[in-house]
Image (cartoon, rainbow, N blue to C red):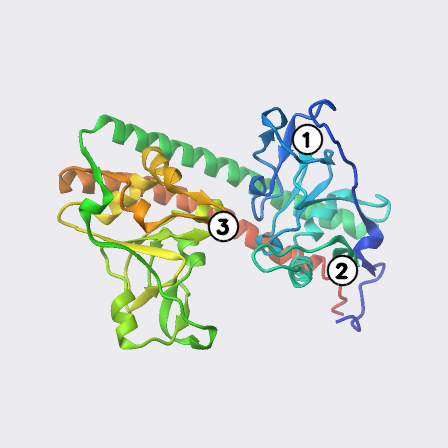
Amino acid sequence: MNNKTLKPGWRRVKFGDVVRLSKARSQDPLADGIERYVGLEHLEPGDLRIRSWGNVADGVTFTSVFQPGQVLFGKRRAYQRKVAVADFSGVCSGDIYVLETTDAQVLLPELLPFICQTDAFFDHAVGTSAGSLSPRTNWTSLADFEFALPSMEAQKLILSVLTSYSALDDNYASANRCALDLLGSHANAIFSNRKYDLVSFEKVLTRQPQSGLYKAQEFLGRGTKIVNMGELFGFDTIESSIDMKRMELTQEEVSKYQLTPDDLLFGRRSIVLEGAGKCSMIGDLQEPVIFESSILRVTVNPEVVLPQFIFEWLRSPKGTQQITRIRSFTTVAGIAGSDLKRIVVPVMPIKEQLAISDELSSIRASVGALSQRQTANRALKKTILEEVLGGWDVH
């Protein structure tokens, strides 16, 4: 690739030649007048805005100082693609690098976060990470990353395009948060104004919590579709139309782990806190589909509760509290089947369950449409990002 001809005015540089790692520290952030701190959990993949943070007054051991305009890059588990631009000052986790351009006349500071969002940069960061459960990249490795630096004129043009897409992403994100808040409020009102009995989850199950199947890598690539955490985290309803990995199984394994319409799936363990206890329903399956070992499956009795009703309950504020109570967090987040079956769920006439499910799922579909537009905008931005920052002369 390095043998290709760059566009006129462009040149190949090492990341460390045009970007520096900030080493500003504060041993007592509160005394230094710093009010906010940022941990990895506050950075969202694909979102350059920092939308949540913690209060230093509540207690924090972080000492790395960042200022508005600097770029925060999550060096731990770089595959999570966490990059953000600070719009306030604070301290951040030691697992976050604070980056800034060395010379604004060489590399525009506003273009730096976009460079950090390219596939090439993330591939380099992931490829140079060390460690098993919590792989981390280091500054020396990041500094060696090579990329095509645009001419200053090109940087300004590229920045104007990418900034427009980022602004649109912000609008979608704001609209999505408002829609989710409205959905949560409506669900809370529904479950607060109805009469129902709360019973232990295990009383409405025909199958107790069951962990999925684990098999060696040699069995992957052929056979039966398998639901992994990626599908569980990405889809509320698991359907055949979803692109999934396949695994070679025995008939006995298929029989033991094959999903049914009355199943609900839960994230048993996850590197992302929100993934622990995340629930998905089962939709139209045209062929046998099983589930992997990081996932729990329960089967409800449809004569007592509808799976889509329990799903909506668990996504409501009241139901979310139930899952939050049973989450644990060590190296990874997780829930135990023994705890899951003891959460409480509502029971009411099937007709009422169906009406509530239909009402909430209709609102959820509208929220989903917003999310799809945001996803499409990010995909287009990503395509443009890779194209315009490639720098290769196609003539």
For label 1, the residue is: 88
Of tags 3 and 1, the one toward the viewer is 3
Q: Position of residue 69 (x, y in %)?
A: 73, 37
| Dot 2: element | loop
> Which label sits in the foreground, 3 or 2?
3
Left or right: residue 52 versus residue 115 is left
Q: Badge 3 is on which residue? A: 332
The quarter of the picture where residue 54 lies is top right
Mark 2 lies on residue: 145
- Disc on the earlier residue, 2 or 1: 1
Question: Secondary structure under badge 1?
Answer: loop
Residue 120 location (% of width, % of height): 68, 61
Instruction: Name the residue nearer the viewer: 96 or 184.
Output: 96
Q: Mark 2 is on which residue type?
A: Phe
Name which residue type carries label 1: Phe
Task: Tell me the SS state at disc 3.
Answer: loop
Between 3 and 151, the one nearer to me in the picture: 3
Neighbour tally class for label 2: few under 14, some 14-19, many 20 plus, Cα within 10 Å: some
Q: Position of residue 360 (x, y in %)?
A: 29, 39
Point 43% across, 52% down: residue: 269
Quadrant in which the N terminus appears: bottom right
Residue 189 appears anywhere in the view:
yes
Residue type, numbered disc 3: Val
Quadrant placement of the C terminus: bottom right
Q: Residues within 10 Å of mark 3 (few under 14, many from 20)?
A: some
Q: Which residue is found at the position 79% from the left and 60% from the top?
A: 144
Between the residue at mark 3 and the residue at mark 2, the CA separation in whole angstroms equals: 30 Å
Q: Does 238 sit above or below residue 48?
A: below
